[in-house]
Amino acid sequence: MNRQAQAAIMFLVGAAVLHAGFTDLYLRYVKAGLRPLLLAAGVVLILAALATVRYDRRASKGEDRHGEGEGEGTGEGTGSGDGQGHAHREPRVSWLLVLPLFALILVAPPALGSYSALHTGTALQAPLAYPRLPATDPLPLSVVDYAGRAAYGHGRTLGHRRIEVTGFVALGHDGTPYLVRMALNCCAADAQPVKIGLTGHIPPVLQPDAWLRVTGTYTGKRAKDPVNDGVIPFLDVTEARPVPTPHDPYDESWNN
C-alpha cells in the first residue's frame, strides 16, 4: 500500500480505538484500568497518520520540482520509455483491510459467556488473605470472593450469613447450574471463568448466559470441574432474580 493508504488505515484504527475508549465498548476487550492507555494509543495513531500524510505531500512536491528541473535541462520528461518515474497503483483489494475496522465500530462483540465457561476449567485460586467483611445483610460478594472463601476458607468467614452474588448462568453437561463470572488479568483474550455451583431454591427454568442475582448461604458442598478438576464450591440459594448485564461484565477483583 502507498503512504496515503497506510495513513488512512492508521487514522481509521486510531478513530476506532478512541471510539471504543470513549464508550463502554472497550470493556469488551480490556480491563477498565487500561482505558487511559487505550485513549493515548488512539491519539498517537491519529497523529502518526496526519504526520504521514504531511510527509508524503512534501515528498511529492519535492519530486515534482526535481522532475521539472531535469526536464528543462535535458529536454526529456518524466514519462520516458524506460519505465522509470512511473507510479504503480496498489491493488484495490488492500482496502479490504478497513472492513474489520468498520466491524469494530458498528458491531459490538458480546462478552464471553457460558460456552467459554464450560469449555475452560475454573481459574479459582487460593486467596492470599480474607479481608474483614462488612455487617450488611445480605452481604454482596463477587463470584471470585465467595468462591475463594467457600473453597479454601471452608466458609469460616461466611458463617450463616446471607450472601448476594451476581453472575451469568451456565448449565453443565449433566444439567448442573453454575453462576459464573469471567475473570481477567489484562484483556478478554486471557479471561478465565470462576464458577459457583447452585443448589437449593433454583428457578425451574434457567437460560444460559442470562444474568442472575442470587441470595443464599454457604454450603460445604463441592464438585470438581470436569475440564481441569478444579474446585467448584456451591451456594445454597434462597432467592434468585434476573438482572441486566452489568456495565462491566468481567471480574477484575482477583488481580487488584
Image (cartoon, grey):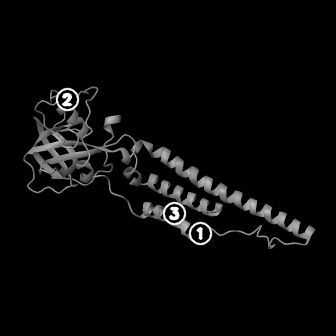
The label nearer to you, 2 versus 3, is 3
* Badge 1 amino acid: Pro
* Badge 2 amino acid: Tyr
Q: Residue at x 38, y 50 (%)?
A: 27
In the rendered structure, are the residues bearing label 2 and label 1 in contact, judged by CB atoms less than 8 Å apart? no
Quarter assignment of residue 133: top left
Residue 126 percent across, percent down from the top left: 25, 30
Q: Which mark is residue 91?
A: 1
Farthest front residue in view: 82
Q: Earlier in the sequence, mark 2 or mark 3?
A: 3
In this rendering, is residue 117 above or below 52?
A: above
Q: Earlier in the sequence, mark 2 or mark 1?
A: 1
Q: Residue at x 45, y 46 (%)?
A: 35
61 and 2: which one is in front? 2
61 and 245: which one is in front? 61
In this rendering, is residue 159 above or below 188?
A: above
Q: Secondary structure at mark 2?
A: loop
Q: Earlier in the sequence, mark 3 or mark 1?
A: 1
The label nearer to you, 3 versus 1, is 1
